[in-house]
Amino acid sequence: MCYRESMLDNNSDVGRYSETDQRLRQLGYRLTPQRMMLLSAIEEGEGHVSAEEIYARVQSRYPGMNISTVYRTLDLLTELGLVTRTDMGGGVVRYHPSNKGQHHHLVCQECGGVAELDDSILTPLRESLEEKYQFQADVRHFAIFGRCARCRR
């Protein structure tokens, strides 16, 4: 059996990807084995994962995958709202499944520490931007940079 058949025959993945598959098909795309592998690598990752980390995971299971496919697929999945892309400093963009909820990060520029920020804190900001500027902000997932209390001491 070829790798593609074994990927598609895995019944545990069928339910897991049915919502994603429907979304992709509605928009004229297919849930290919490569897309399934990338989604798995993102979902299996601890927290947020970089394109290079995703590539390493997929490469170990499917050596034929190349990094340009990873970047193109991540761009598509981000554009379709299936994953979020966040720059958390250090020149590395990180990805996170959209279905794992909205959350934001406070990133210390001195020590690199990251703390989660509850989405409700941004409600007044969203409302102010809408009211004052008639601007509807997309703040599903982002990082705010500064210095943590420990580094400020």
Image (cartoon, rainbow, N blue to C red):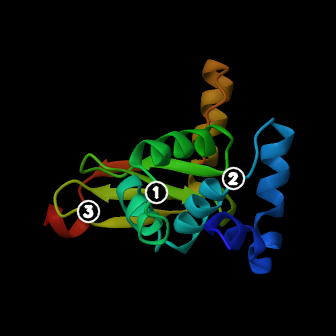
**How far separated are the C-alphas under marks 2 and 3?**
43 Å
The kind of residue on which mark 1 rests is: Gly
Q: Residues within 10 Å of mark 2 (few under 14, many from 20)?
A: few
Q: Which mark is residue 32?
A: 2
The circle on residue 148 is: 3
* Residue furthest left as drawn: 153
- Whole-percent x, y for residue 17 in the image: 76, 64
Which residue shows up at 56% across the image and 44% down it? 73
Q: Choose the circle earlier in sequence order: 2 or 3.
A: 2
Answer left or right for 54 relative to 2.
Answer: left
Rendering coords of residue 130 (x, y %): 67, 28
Q: Secondary structure at mark 2?
A: loop
Q: Earlier in the sequence, mark 1 or mark 3?
A: 1
Badge 3 amino acid: Cys
- Tell me, yes or no, if residue 119 can be seen here: yes
Q: Residue furthest front?
A: 1
Image x and y of residue 152, in percent:
16, 61
Q: Count the labels in the image.
A: 3
Q: Which residue carries the number 1 mark?
A: 64
At x 28% / y 66%, what residue is drawn? 113
Label 3 neighbourhood size at 10 Å, few (<14), some (14-19), many (20+)?
some
Quadrant of res 7? bottom right
Distance from Cα at disc 1 to Cα at disc 2: 14 Å
Nearer-N-terminus badge (1/2): 2
Split into 4 quadrants, where in the image is the N terminus? Answer: bottom right
- The amino acid type of the residue labelled 2 equals Thr
